[in-house]
Image (spheres, rainbow, N blue to C red):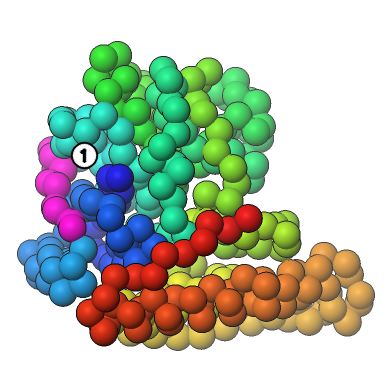
Amino acid sequence: MIIVSASDNNFVPGLLVLLYSAWINNPDARFHVIDAGIDSGNLDRIRAFCAGNGIDCSILRADADALASLPKPKHWTSATYARLFLPDLLPEADRVIHVDADAIVNSDISELWDLDLGDHLVAGVADTTIDLDLLEQIGIALGDYINAGVLVMNLAQWRREGTAGKMVRQLIDHPELAFADQTAINVVARGRILHLAKEFNIFAREFSDRKHMRPRIIHYSGQFKPWTSRISPMTEVFDAYRVASRADIPAPPHGWDFKRLRRTALGLVCLRPKYWRRVACRLHYRSAFSAPHIRDLHTKAAAVRRGGAPPEQATPS
């Protein structure tokens, strides 16, 4: 199984925790990090971290000129484009699992690797939070548009059809479209996208809508990242992996959002259902998912520190 992620300097703390989480739950996987703007000090840090943990990881160098030639994303750096160049960066690989550096892999994901992709170009999870105006612009129905945070990429098919080039052309021809390469992937792969279960790309900020779901991959999408602030829901899971990894990543400040706290307090006092639902869901996740998962992680991390392999984990039902 090959797991890939791309990063620049901004996402290195998240990347290290991602690598640790994916490795301790999938110890036989091979990893590749796409350097899309990582300085030499951080590259050395990544290499030392992987070597110290026995993580089979190599660094791939993205073409800086190729990245710079693409339209500058509004809310991200050009590192987001790096995955489009994987067919050339990994010419021997027929498929990869690409996971964004602001996610954690908290389960065995070998079933993603074993998927029968057929002639599908990519597999991903539907993004039901996407802006409806964008969907109207590109002519894709809600529920068909996928989030690019977790992708199973059929690189063999991409090479045969020149898919990466088509996506680059889409980006250049339509720089006005939101979500940059994610939208380009959806437009070019339309009709040939295999949809994955939501558990494989749970947005942490969506936790209140997923009360009975056990995340397999948690994606900390959005403005607040769990290595810079504790505002995002489910930061306790990221924090557990951060501590277990011993990656020397400082604990983030609480970063209280007082406007949000005031709004929540008023919502609870006024008995507004959505605010009480959020509180109930947060308590449910902590007792039914976070607490037992963190205990399991501590067991695995202790086994690794004693020199053994991570104990096998049962696949969540």
Q: Residue at x 17, y 36 (%)?
A: 90
- Classed neighbour count for the residue bearing mark 1: other residues with Cα under 10 Å, few (<14), some (14–19), many (≥20): many
**Left/right of residue 258 with respect to residue 201 in the rendered view:** right
Q: Residue at x 43, y 26 (%)?
A: 117
Asked if the magenta segment contains residue 65, the reply would be: yes
**Left/right of residue 31 with respect to residue 299 in the rendered view:** left
**Which portion, as a residue range, is magenta?**
56-67
In the displayed structure, 174 sits above or below 306; it is: above
Instruction: State which quarter of the image contains the C terminus.
Output: bottom right
In the displayed structure, 309 sits above or below 240; it is: above
Q: Amino acid at mark 1?
A: Leu
Asked if residue 36 can be seen in this view, the reply is: no
Where does label 1 land, which residue?
Answer: 67
Q: Position of residue 203 (x, y in %)?
A: 56, 56
Q: Position of residue 269 (x, y in %)?
A: 88, 82
Q: Residue at x 21, y 63 (%)?
A: 55
Q: In the rendered image, which quarter is residue 206 located in? A: bottom right
In the displayed structure, 85 sits above or below 228; it is: above
Q: Position of residue 199 (x, y in %)?
A: 58, 51
